Amino acid sequence: MAKANKNTNIITAEQVLLTELSQLIEQSQQQIVSQVNNTLTMLFWHIGTRINKEILQNKRADYGKRIVSTLSTQLKEKYGINFELRNLQRMMQFAEQFADNSIVSTLSTQLSWSHFVTLLPLKSQEAKLFYAQTSATQALGIRDLRKQISTKTFERSSIANLQNTSNHPAIHNTFKDPYFLDFLGLQNTYLEKDLEAAILRELEAFILELGKGFAFVERQKRMIIDGEDFHLDLLFYPGI
């Protein structure tokens, strides 16, 4: 029996060692990928900046088109498909739209080149920076970033901030994930009380479907934050 326990202890120790080494290897792999992404993104930014500067100094549109096409052919032949014409044009757009080197240096440690390519078609510079910073802070992948853009998170957050008449930092820019409320069946124009009532109806139906275990506390619950009065539309919580 003692021998069996000893073997079990050896196996357990080996498993622990394997787990620790696996974690070290995976952490190193992640760091390498992050460093490669950072280096590649900054390389593309510098290439785009240099080409833009050359074209701007020459001040000839035909020269700009010719030099970009020629450079693409030469660089692609020497360094591969990363430097095909379309990608070279993206580098130029990238350098023009994200002109601040310090911002790019910071974001490139957390975002890949594909993140920036996804942001290039956006018309608003403010939106580009919003989605870039959101992707960095929330560690969003490309799919999640595209979802944020398609659901107009920036636009809806901006509207929410404009409608917020208080400058209190505790509630400004609080709503990070705006939602479409078409399912409520409201008309194009409606009062806040209509919205509240419609949401309450949907919540009530949803909670009833879940069964027991939820407690509805109060509507328009008064909250005092730093001496200022605020009212929560609905307050409820799940039971234990």
Image: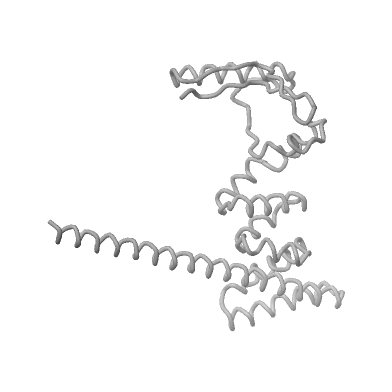
Q: Position of residue 196 (x, y in %)?
A: 67, 19
Quarter holding the N terminus? bottom left
Q: Residue furthest front?
A: 2
- Whether residue 89 sits left or right of residue 20 in the image: it is right
Where 191 sits versus 74, above or below? above
Where 149 sits versus 170, above or below? below
Q: Residue at x 75, y 51 (%)?
A: 123
Q: Position of residue 3 (x, y in %)?
A: 14, 61
Return the residue nearer the eye: 62 or 133.
Answer: 133
Please say which color scheme the image uses. Answer: one colour
Return the residue nearer the eye: 199 or 72.
Answer: 199
Mark count: 0
Quarter of image, res 106: bottom right
Return the residue nearer the eye: 143 or 101.
Answer: 101
Q: Residue at x 59, y 67 (%)?
A: 37
Return the residue nearer the eye: 214 or 32.
Answer: 214
Q: Position of residue 174 (x, y in %)?
A: 70, 37
Q: Residue at x 67, y 70 (%)?
A: 42
- Whether residue 70 sits left or right of residue 56 in the image: it is left
Quarter of image, res 57: bottom right
Q: Position of residue 190 (x, y in %)?
A: 73, 19
Where 160 sits versus 37, above or below? above
Where 156 sits versus 68, above or below? above
Q: Residue furthest left?
A: 1
Q: Residue at x 19, y 57 (%)?
A: 5
